[in-house]
Structures are given as structure tokens and as C-alpha cells.
């Protein structure tokens, strides 16, 4: 993918980097033939800004669209009603997990006045999600625009993923020993991470359509992030730290050969575990435990 690169000053604010990103992007779009960086001209709204860990540079690139994504304004009245319900379900779930907190009008105005740089836009990502029976249901997710985070360059952004070798090894061991395996999913995963430890919290502007979703709110109300919610750059890393801590509380230990493998001793010996003699525990049971624990972490 063609990109336009920005080399940020080590001490530059995120806002300064974004301004420079816009300048570079507009220049690249209007003079693509000379720069050879962007394949076609487009508006700044059609671009995304990413931080390349390997080069330590910010890069502006064309955004990709999800084929299952929809534009709310182009939906029929019945379809809009389906997505209003999906948005309501999304927000109620996040409020129940205490991932977001709806600030009072007075608190919202005070926060915006004292910390305007910490008030970030939010938006809905609406799409149709395929079901097992071959149908599709409306799915909505609220996303905070984390690339505008004032602490962007100071946050931990990366989280490891299992290597191909680790996957193959784990599957081979399970197959050889006749173990059964399961692949669970965590609902509202980022919302269930542990309470954020930020000294300065991040607030979010209400996305459009909150009233249609059934919430009696004022346009000046703000959402306070109580954890590293979806959209914040630190979300993946914080979720991993939360999961590792909870698994360790259950007695699991990290595998010395892969950061994404944790094993449980059948005798609960913890760090004295011999990986070769370990047995698996159904992760479905663990997922229910994690839900209870994450709720208690925020109480």
C-alpha cells in the first residue's frame, strides 16, 4: 500500500503530528505523480494515520472499507430501527461492564473546559454480521478516535500474537494426547479489560444517533472511558495485560517459548509446571470466570 511518511519530533504533541500528517497528505494527493507515494487523490476523510513500529514513523494511507459495512443514512426506516437496537445493545453492554460512564452535564462541561485535548470524537461502525444459519444481523460498535489521543506517542501499542510454529505445536500436542479443544470469543473484549490506570482519563463526545438508540442525553454530555476501550491505541496491549493477570490468578503460567501460550498444572503447581505433563482446561469456563472478575475489578 502506498503511503506518505511523517517523521514526528520526539517531543511533538499528537496534535502537531496530525497537522503535519494533513499537510503531507494534501501535498501527496495533489502531486502524486512527483512524489510517487499515493496512487490516487482523495480527501483527508478517506485516509488513516498509522504508527509504524518498525520504522518509528507515522504513515498516512488510504483507508479500506469493510464489504459488510453499511452507511446508516442510506438505510431504510426498518433497517435503521434494527441498527438503533444494535446501538442500544452495544452501549448498554459497555455501561454494564463499566467500560464507559455517562458523565453528568455539569461534569461534562467542566471536563471539556479543563481538558479540551482529552475530549475525543467517537463514531459508530455499523455492519451486518453473518449468522450460523446463513442469515445476517445488525451489529454496531462505538469507536473512539484514538489516533487523536494527546498521549499517543507515550502509550504501549503492541500486543503479541501466536506464531505459526506455536499454533502447529499446540495442535500437534493436543492431537497426540487426544485432548479436546475449544475456541471461545469474549464479548465486548476491550470493554472487559481491567480499569485503566491513566492519571488523566480520556473523554468521548457522544456519537450521533444516541437518542434514536433510546438514550435521553444532551448533545454536551460526554462519555468517560473507565478502561482502554475500542479505538484507543493502547486497547490491545491493555486487554492482553488484563487477560494474562486473570489467567495467572487462575494458576496458569506463561510458556517460556511463546508469549501467547499459557498452561495449567493438573496439580496447581504454578511455576513448577512441566509443560509436557500439563492438561488443558475448557476455556469456556474461564471466560465466564473472567466476566465475573472484570466486573469486580471496577466495582
Image: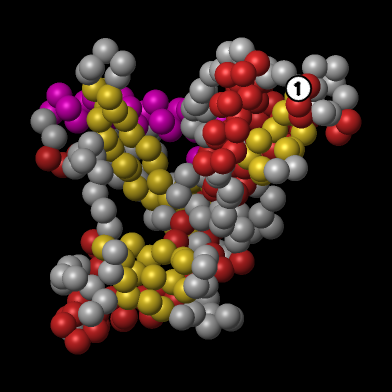
Residue for point 23% across, 80% down: 36
Question: Going by the image, does 245 lie left or right of 97?
Answer: right
Q: Is residue 271 left or right of residue 202?
A: right
| Residue 79 lies in quadrant | top left
Q: Locate residue 204 relative to residue 199 in the image: left or right.
A: left
Q: Nearer the viewer, residue 208 or 75?
A: 75
Q: Residues within 10 Å of mark 1 (few under 14, many from 20)?
A: some
* Figure quadrant of residue 298: top right
Which of 175/48 is in front? 175
Q: For the magenta stretch, what is the residue range?
A: 77-104
- Residue 228 lies in the magenta stretch: no
Q: Position of residue 266 (x, y in %)?
A: 80, 17
Q: Is residue 120 above or below residue 57?
A: above
Q: Residue at x 19, y 80 (%)?
A: 32
Residue 291, given in percent of the width and then of the height, sits at 62, 24
SS assignment at label 1: loop
**Residue drawn at (15%, 24%) of the image:** 78
Amino acid at each position: 500500500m502506498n503511503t506518505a511518511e511523517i517523521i514526528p519530533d520526539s517531543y511533538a504533541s499528537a496534535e502537531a503530528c496530525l497537522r503535519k500528517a494533513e499537510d503531507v497528505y494534501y501535498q501527496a494527493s495533489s502531486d502524486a505523480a512527483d512524489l510517487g507515494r499515493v496512487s490516487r487523490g482523495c480527501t483527508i476523510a478517506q485516509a488513516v494515520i498509522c504508527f509504524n513500529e518498525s520504522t518509528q514513523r507515522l504513515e498516512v494511507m488510504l483507508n479500506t472499507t469493510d464489504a459488510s459495512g453499511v452507511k446508516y443514512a442510506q438505510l431504510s426506516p426498518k433497517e435503521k430501527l434494527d441498527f438503533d437496537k444494535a446501538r442500544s445493545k452495544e452501549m448498554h453492554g459497555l455501561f454494564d461492564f463499566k467500560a464507559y460512564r455517562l458523565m453528568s452535564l455539569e461534569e461534562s462541561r467542566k471536563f471539556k473546559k479543563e481538558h479540551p485535548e482529552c475530549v475525543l470524537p467517537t463514531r459508530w461502525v455499523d455492519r451486518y454480521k453473518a449468522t450460523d444459519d446463513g442469515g445476517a444481523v445488525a451489529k454496531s460498535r462505538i469507536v473512539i478516535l484514538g489516533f487523536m489521543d494527546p498521549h499517543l506517542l507515550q502509550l504501549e501499542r503492541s500486543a503479541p500474537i501466536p506464531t505459526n510454529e506455536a499454533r502447529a505445536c499446540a495442535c500437534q500436542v493436543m492431537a497426540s494426547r487426544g485432548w479436546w479443544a475449544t475456541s471461545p470469543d469474549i464479548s465486548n473484549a476491550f470493554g472487559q479489560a481491567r480499569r485503566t490506570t491513566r492519571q488523566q482519563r480520556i473523554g468521548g463526545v457522544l456519537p450521533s444517533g444516541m437518542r434514536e438508540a433510546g438514550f435521553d442525553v444532551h448533545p454536551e454530555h460526554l462519555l468517560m472511558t473507565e478502561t482502554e476501550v475500542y479505538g484507543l491505541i493502547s486497547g490491545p496491549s491493555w486487554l492482553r495485560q488484563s487477560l494474562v493477570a486473570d489467567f495467572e490468578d487462575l494458576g496458569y503460567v506463561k510458556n517460556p517459548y511463546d508469549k501467547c501460550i499459557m498452561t495449567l498444572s493438573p496439580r496447581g503447581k504454578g511455576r513448577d509446571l512441566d509443560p509436557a505433563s500439563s492438561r488443558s482446561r475448557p476455556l469456556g469456563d474461564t471466560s465466564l470466570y473472567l466476566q465475573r472478575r472484570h466486573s469486580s475489578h471496577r466495582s
